[in-house]
Image (cartoon, rainbow, N blue to C red):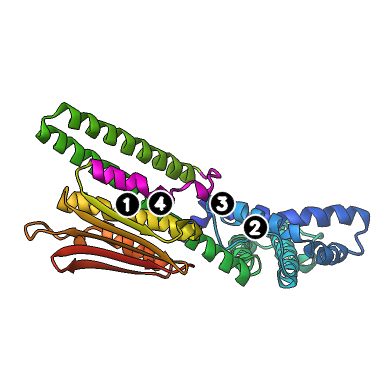
């Protein structure tokens, strides 16, 4: 019994009731003007529902009153974009008015019926209710008084549930809106993955260089080498802070231009940082880097950065060969370094997975693994 009456203490029961009462306010005002043509408000709803902005207003009301406290995505708050959306809005307005009329009748006449039954049970005659006008007073009418109350309870709860279901059907997002929402969600996920890769590459590179430089400076016990190591740590740290600030700007939804991200034109900074860390970098760059599309050049920079970071992290200051070639718009990037047998293979790390993901997003290929005693990273990125 308690479970059956639980909706009486739910706030949503009464907000839904209010939502159904609102159209009846308009009908009541019209009744003061002409109570012989109560169909006029329903007719006015047809052209009103064709206005695109009305769908937005109805969607907002549905979220606030039919599902209060929940951001129900089943209710669209976008204006009508197609004639199908407009017609669905008209259908919803008519359904809302119909359910509102039924709710109003139930809320007015069922309580009146309870009072009439009580009066009849107490011995009074009733003349203002046609159905019971000729009924003789009798105490047995007291047994019928719970029935209108139960009917009122069922009408209030049931019509509210029916209105919510109808709103979800008629005010729900269209196929185009669902596709747009799915595309936005996909873009958000891709952006999160990109930011994670950016932080991993930039901050990971800076920390790796700092650790290698600090260890080398302590082992060298040379003031000159220590000075160069500190300068390299400072430069790498500043670059990492710039990258971090840019990524945080994206998270804050600022309009930081994508062009501010480093490209392969800034590759000399990476190579010099690795050289200062003790690695012997044999670099060869051929072809016009400036002709590369922006996405290819930016991702190529990050791939080179992660490759050099893996060299310093897993192999240390070892001779490393870097080849960057541009031919017919295709970028070929290769990094090779000796990999002693005593070292752990870097293939298990997230860095190589990030390299493969970056290459795959641009439709390119990435090959990583041992090759003739070296560890080789070779990436080919098409022009786009």
Residue 29 shown in magenta? no
- Mark 1 to mark 2: distance in Å? 45 Å
Question: Where is mark 3, residue-wise?
Answer: 68
How packed mark 3 is, by other alpha carbons closer than 10 Å (few <14, some 14-19, many 20 or more), is some
Frontmost of labels 4 and 1 is 1
**Is any atom of residue 276 visible in this view?**
yes
Which is more foreground, mark 3 or mark 1?
1
Per the model, the C-alpha gap separating discs 2 and 3 is 15 Å
CA distance for labels 4 and 3: 35 Å
Q: Dot 2 corresponds to which residue?
A: 77
Q: Are marks 2 and 3 in contact (CB under 8 Å)?
A: no
Q: Position of residue 123 (x, y in %)?
A: 70, 57
Among numbered discs 4 and 1, the one appearing first in the sequence: 4
Comes first in the chain, label 4 or label 2: 2
Q: Residues within 10 Å of mark 4 (few under 14, many from 20)?
A: some
Q: Which mark is residue 103?
A: none
**In 3D space, how far apart are the residues under numbered discs 4 and 2 (Cα atoms)?**
30 Å
**Left or right of 235, for residue 38:** right
Direction from residue 376 to residue 34 in the image, left or right:
right
Q: Nearer the viewer, residue 63 or 367?
A: 367
Residue behind mark 4: 195
Mark 1 — residue?
305
Q: Can you say whether 222 is above or below 86 in the image?
A: above
Span colored in magenta: 253-276
């Amino acid at each position: 019994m308690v479970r059956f009456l639980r909706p009486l203490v739910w706030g949503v029961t009464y907000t839904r009731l209010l939502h159904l009462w609102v159209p009846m306010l308009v009908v009541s005002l019209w009744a003061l003007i002409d109570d012989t043509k109560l169909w006029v408000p329903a007719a006015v709803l047809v052209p009103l529902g064709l206005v695109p902005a009305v769908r937005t207003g109805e969607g907002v009301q549905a979220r606030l009153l039919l599902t209060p406290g929940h951001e129900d995505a089943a209710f669209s708050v976008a204006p009508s974009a197609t004639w199908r959306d407009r017609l669905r809005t008209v259908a919803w307005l008519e359904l809302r008015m119909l359910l509102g009329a039924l709710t109003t009748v139930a809320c007015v006449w069922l309580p009146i019926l309870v009072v009439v039954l009580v009066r009849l049970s107490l011995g009074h005659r009733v003349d203002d209710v046609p159905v019971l006008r000729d009924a003789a007073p009798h105490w047995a009418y007291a047994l019928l008084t719970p029935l209108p109350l139960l009917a009122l309870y069922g009408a209030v709860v049931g019509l509210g549930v029916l209105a919510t279901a109808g709103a979800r059907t008629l005010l729900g997002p269209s196929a185009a809106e669902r596709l747009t929402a799915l595309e936005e969600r996909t873009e958000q996920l891709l952006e999160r993955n990109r930011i994670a890769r950016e932080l991993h590459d930039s901050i990971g590179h800076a920390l790796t260089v700092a650790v290698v430089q600090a260890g080398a400076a302590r082992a060298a016990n040379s003031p000159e080498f220590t000075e160069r190591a500190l300068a390299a740590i400072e430069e790498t740290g500043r670059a990492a802070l710039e990258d971090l600030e840019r990524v945080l700007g994206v998270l804050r939804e600022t309009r930081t231009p994508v062009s501010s991200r480093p490209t392969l034109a800034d590759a000399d900074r990476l190579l010099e940082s690795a050289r200062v860390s003790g690695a012997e970098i044999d670099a060869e760059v051929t072809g016009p880097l400036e002709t590369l599309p922006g996405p290819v050049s930016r991702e190529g920079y990050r791939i080179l950065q992660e490759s050099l970071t893996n060299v310093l992290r897993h192999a240390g200051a070892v001779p490393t060969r870097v080849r960057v070639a541009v031919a017919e718009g295709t970028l070929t990037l290769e990094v090779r370094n000796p990999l002693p047998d005593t070292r752990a293979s870097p293939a298990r790390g997230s860095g190589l997975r990030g390299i493969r993901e970056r290459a795959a997003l641009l439709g390119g290929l990435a090959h990583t693994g041992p090759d003739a005693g070296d560890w080789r990273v070779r990436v080919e990125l098409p022009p786009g």
